[in-house]
Amino acid sequence: MSLATLTRLALAGNRTDAARVALTALSALLATLAALAALTVLAIEKPPGDAWQQSEQYVSDLLSQPGLRGGTAFALVLLTIPVLALAGQSARLGAPSRDRRLAALRLAGATSGQVSRVAMLETGFASLGGTLVGLAAYLIGRSVLHRPDANGLLALPTDVLPPVSAMAAVVFGLPVLAAAATAVLLRRVVTTPLGVVRRAGRTGSPRPWPALLIGLGVLAAAMIEQIQWALQGAGLEWLALIALLGIFGAVMGVIFGVGWISHLAGRTLHRFARRPAALLAARRLTDDPWASSRTFAALLAALIIAGGAAAFRASFRLHAEIEQEQNRQAGYGGEIYYNPFYLDTMNLVDLAVAVAVVIAVAGLFVTLVEGIVSRRRAYAALVATGVPRATIGTSIVWQVLTPVVPAVLIALGVGYAIGRLLTGGVGRGGPQPDVPLGQLASQGAGAIIAVLLVVGLGMLFLRSNTAVEELRAT
Amino acid sequence: MTQLQARGLVKSYGPTPALRGITLDIDEGEIVAVTGPSGCGKSTLLHCLAGILRPDAGEVSWQGHRLDTWSEAARSRLRRTDFGVLFQFGQLVAELTAAENVALPLLLAGTGRRAARTAALTWLERLGVAECADLRPGEMSGGQQQRCATARALVTEPRVLFADEPTGALDTLTGEQVLTQLVRLAREQHTSVVLVTHEPRIAAYADREVILRDGVIDHTGLGLDAPLTGGAR
């Protein structure tokens, strides 16, 4: 099959396919912006002098201090995680109609490999469109935002450009990566002329082994201070690597742990359910507990970072209070000074977390609507037999909320524990920061309210997808 | 005694007419087959009679009450209590076991879980699929699934059962077995049945056959042999 034919087939489709392509392109655009922003921060040249020589042309210390630029770039790269999760969830949008289209291609004589290539090309082209628009937005934004203030200082690093090769790697690499991810996702899917068959995935009940990953992550964070003392300042790179691996392990532990939580919650709910809505939700939770892991992965990752950020903020605030107290005792008059840099930095981190949560919630919305659309025929049949739509809606609420409430609590708890262990106290035996219960509670409540809002929005799609006309659809 | 009455039913899908003035009575305990070629309006008539669809014009009366003027919630309630509905496929909840699927209408009506399960097991037994009680639809054959769906449609002991091509997805032998059981149980509990089918062999199970052509009842007696004019669904 020629590339032109493959392209034509990849770009064919209905409105749902167009929505999936648009969302994939949007995800690629956001990921491109985040990646180019990170590359730009890394492209800032260190002025001649010692290792701590600052780039004085910027307003923010996050850009001027060479020691902080790596962290800033890392935070920007972290933002691509929920964006990529959104892309993954977008790929599931309209899957039934795409499956039918691919099956029709097989019926017309296409091989399984050709059909997979069509799906990969669709994702690849959509992503390429997104990365190209992202590059254009980056270049235009760079030009528009290049406005030095009265002191000649820049708010953003609009005076530097990443290497062309690095930008090309982002613009062309992301679509290749997205197409490859599609190929991996399709490895369990066999498109036959009669439809799409999914090979059996993970079977059996989830086990609580993710708790071990969480434990190892927390342990790694707990040992950082001891190792630092033992190494006496040497091997800082290894320490950073251990900390990163620990955090990554804990994040994975929480995400996979949701599968176990879902299964357990489903079994418990099934045991005590008296109403059909709870029974339906319980069976769905036990039937595919990993669905919750996939659905909430980005949200939980963002909340772990949020919990850690809360611990860092509490620690920095304690430091600031101690600094103020010391200044007061030293008899400095006038405004009692403390360095607001770290607390201001935490505001930026909180903003990044909020953006990540919004992107994660957008992904959740896509998943929820896709779930309703893919079950529309079954739902329409239930409604036709007299099952109230409210029962179906309530079952969806149960299905979402039952695992997400404990998962949010665990994510915030793990994030806070790791953050607290990484920040340590103020010296050994010194004062310890209070647990920022208010901040953690507002983060948890905010996430759950956002999830509830998404479920509420999803319910708007329930009515149209339970219309009796769905029973006529082939 | 007439249970269900349709008077001058008209229903269109956009510019395409599906029903063009159907008048029909269903008596208590009567089994009526609605037959006709594809697209003649059989399923639309069944949906209007069962209160799933509202007709554009005309009346549907249930025990003397205008069903077509009821709210959707009230019509849904009727389908949970006095009506049973059976489709060709796709009606069982994939995640629930057979027993849970059959118990679903009872749970919706407020029956306790234990009592609902007991009733579900009884009905599965009556339909000869007791061994499937704890299986999910995906673990059952098409015939077993349809028996479970039949059990679910009958578990509330409805006054009228609406069956839309209930054997359409089954092989001939299994289809006849399912239909034989359905008719036997309906007669046992004096349930009226509106059976939509395009197969004369299935229609032969009914007390009376109503033939639709292009959205109207065919009184010519030519049945499926009459030439098509098209237009209706």
Image (tube, rainbow, N blue to C red):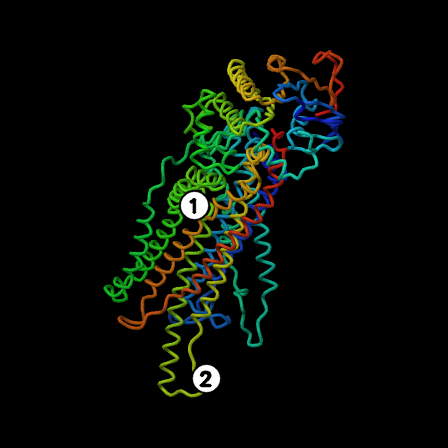
**Left/right of residue A464 with respect to residue B16 in the rendered view:** left
| Amino acid type for the residue under numbered disc 2 | Glu
Mark 1 / mark 2, whichever is N-terminal: 1
The correct choice, above or below, for A311 with respect to A297 in the image is below
Visible in this render: residue A104? no
SS at mark 1? helix
Q: Where is residue A15 in the image (x, y as percent from the top left)?
A: 63, 40
Q: Which chain carries label 1?
A: A
Name, please, the residue furthest toward the left. A230
Which percent across, then down, holds residue A121?
55, 38
Q: Which mark is residue B57?
A: none
The residue that disc 2 covers is A335
Give the numbered dot on residue A293: 1
Residue A134 seen by the camera: yes
Q: Residue B3: x percent and y percent?
A: 66, 25
Q: In which quarter of the image is the C terminus of chain B?
A: top right
Q: Mark 1 against mark 2, which lies toward the viewer?
A: 1
Decide: few, some or many residues near mark 2? Use Cα within 10 Å; few <14, some 14-19, many ≥20: few
| Front residue (pair B44, A335) | B44
Q: Distance between the residues labelled 1 and 2?
A: 50 Å
| Viewer-side residue, B191 vs A305 | B191
Among the 4 quarters of the image, the one containing residue A122: top right
Q: Give the quadrant of the N terminus of chain B.
A: top right
**Residue A145 falls in image quadrant:** bottom right
Q: In which quarter of the image is residue A384?
A: top right
Question: For this rendering, which residue is in front, B116 or A374?
Answer: B116
